[in-house]
Image: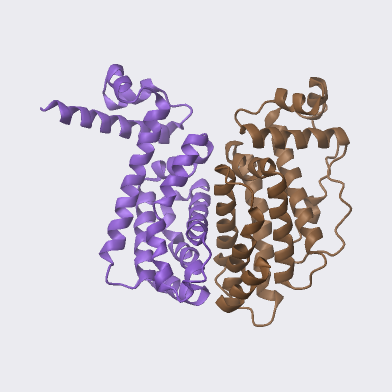
């Protein structure tokens, strides 16, 4: 096996092990020993690749969002012929679907991260900002485009994130799909106003 | 040690639970049972806001306030207990500031504008208090998060009183107010956490826009945004 492949796969195994262990027992309680045991990789290899636990965690964290963003992007793009509100609903549907399936990792990346220190929180904010381009297309779609405040995307993402945070924290992460209509409303409302946001919310509720 | 013998009256405890209507005669502001206790709570907020919750220590609070160790432990069991009360104290104070500013206003929009402006002014003057309440609460455990949810619920209820406040108000889905509060919170959180400070007051127009939009529509939202820029 080519050595480059081996290294990449060891790295991936370590990143995944970091996520699984931290999701199961919490970031604080997670040790490098746990991670290398689950990954089946030597301590030397871990140290060579990451150096320490926080570095490994932050990289694993980015990897989670790479997957989430790719998943949401695919849903958003596959609805390319639909109007923007429907594409947003498709993206949100993909997001909550994946978070619900991976409830432990969802808890780690959406809830526990906010308690994990400045670096992790900075990563979290940067990760959420990756959803901004999908939202900002709403400026062209909205007939309020010119008027919309500068922080509209941050506001919309923040509203949705906070609802997701509350659900996961309340232990309802696996049923996250249930709040999809609310999320659709919260994200669209700042761009489109209440009527259009509500009509898309109703469409999503009907499941059409 | 007299952990919570004293009735730690927080004026807001009942006062702030009432939502939806801002009482013109807010109760006299006596937030805490003793000046020493209040000094510790203020010190705790400043230390947490400046250093972060995890790094904050009782020692730092003592250094800041010039109190003796015993004085702290006479009042509080530990850092966590002190922070929880400091959180309530800080939130109660912000709510009282908002209430006082809104007291002269008649309309929901007027009360919202005045209340928000007053709170944003506090954040401009004391960003470390904002960080202690809005950012660091996440590092302070489950009970702290619970209290944060309760505070956000009170704000949500006030926002949603727009439903009944005025003629011609729309009736958006129940989630609308929660989304508004969460959105404002996210904008404040991001600014406080990144030290993007100064100019919280400048957020007032866009906050008015977002809050007015679901109840009164885009035209009124734009008008309120312009009015708040003045």
Q: Residue at x 36, y 45 (%)?
A: A65
Question: Where is residue B57 drawn, in percent x and y?
Answer: 67, 26
Q: Residue furthest left?
A: A1
> In the rendered view, does B171 fall on the left or right side of B166?
left
Q: Is residue B205 above or below residue B218?
A: above
A16, above or below A70, in the image: above
Q: Which x, y percent locates residue A123?
A: 44, 41
- Write the residue at 79% across / 26% down: B72
Q: Is residue B15 visible?
A: yes
Outermost residue toward the top in this view: A44
What's the coloring here? by chain
Q: Which chain is purple?
A: A
Q: Quadrant of the C terminus of chain A?
A: bottom left
For residue A75, above or below residue B11:
below
Res. A20 image quadrant: top left
Residue A116 lies left or right of residue A41; in this view the side is: right
Colour in which the image shows chain B: brown
Quick check: B150 left or right of B5?
left
Q: Name the foreground residue: A170 vs A14.
A: A14
């Amino acid at each position: 096996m080519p050595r480059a492949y081996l290294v990449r796969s060891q790295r991936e195994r370590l990143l995944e092990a970091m996520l699984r262990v931290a999701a199961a027992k919490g970031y604080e309680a997670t040790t490098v020993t746990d991670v290398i045991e689950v990954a089946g990789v030597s301590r030397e290899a871990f140290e060579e690749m990451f150096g320490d636990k926080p570095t490994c965690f932050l990289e694993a964290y980015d990897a989670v969002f790479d997957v989430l963003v790719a998943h949401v992007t695919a849903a958003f793009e596959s609805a390319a012929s639909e109007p923007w509100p429907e594409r947003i609903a498709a993206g949100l549907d993909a997001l909550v679907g994946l978070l619900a399936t991976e409830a432990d990792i969802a808890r780690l990346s959406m809830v526990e991260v906010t308690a994990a220190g400045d670096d992790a929180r900075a990563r979290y904010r940067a990760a959420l900002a990756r959803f901004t381009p999908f939202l900002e297309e709403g400026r062209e779609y909205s007939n309020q485009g010119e008027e919309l405040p500068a922080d509209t995307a941050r506001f919309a993402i923040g509203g949705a994130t906070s609802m997701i945070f509350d659900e996961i924290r309340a232990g309802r992460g696996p049923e996250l799909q249930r709040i999809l209509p609310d999320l659709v409303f919260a994200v669209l409302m700042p761009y489109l106003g209440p009527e259009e946001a509500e009509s898309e919310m109703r469409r999503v509720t009907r499941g059409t | 040690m007299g952990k919570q013998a004293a009735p730690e009256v927080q004026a807001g405890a009942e006062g702030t639970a009432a939502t939806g209507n801002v009482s013109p005669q807010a109760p006299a502001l006596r937030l805490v049972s003793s000046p020493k206790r209040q000094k510790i709570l203020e010190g705790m907020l400043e230390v947490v806001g400046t250093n972060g919750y995890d790094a904050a220590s009782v020692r730092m609070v003592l250094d800041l306030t010039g109190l003796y160790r015993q004085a702290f432990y006479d009042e509080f069991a530990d850092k966590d207990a002190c922070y929880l009360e400091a959180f309530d104290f800080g939130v109660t104070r912000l709510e009282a500031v908002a209430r006082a500013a809104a007291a002269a206003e008649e309309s929901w929009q007027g009360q919202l504008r005045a209340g928000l402006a007053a709170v944003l002014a506090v954040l401009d003057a004391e960003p470390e208090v904002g960080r202690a309440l809005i950012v660091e609460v996440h590092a302070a455990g489950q009970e702290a998060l619970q209290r944060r949810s309760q505070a956000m619920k009170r704000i949500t209820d006030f926002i949603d009183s727009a439903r009944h406040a005025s003629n011609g108000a729309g009736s958006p889905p129940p989630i609308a107010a929660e989304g508004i509060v969460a959105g404002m919170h996210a904008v404040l959180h991001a600014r406080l956490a990144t030290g993007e400070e100064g100019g919280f007051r400048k957020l007032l127009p866009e906050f008015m826009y977002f809050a007015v939009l679901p109840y009164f529509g885009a035209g009124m939202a734009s008008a309120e945004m312009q009015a708040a820029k003045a």
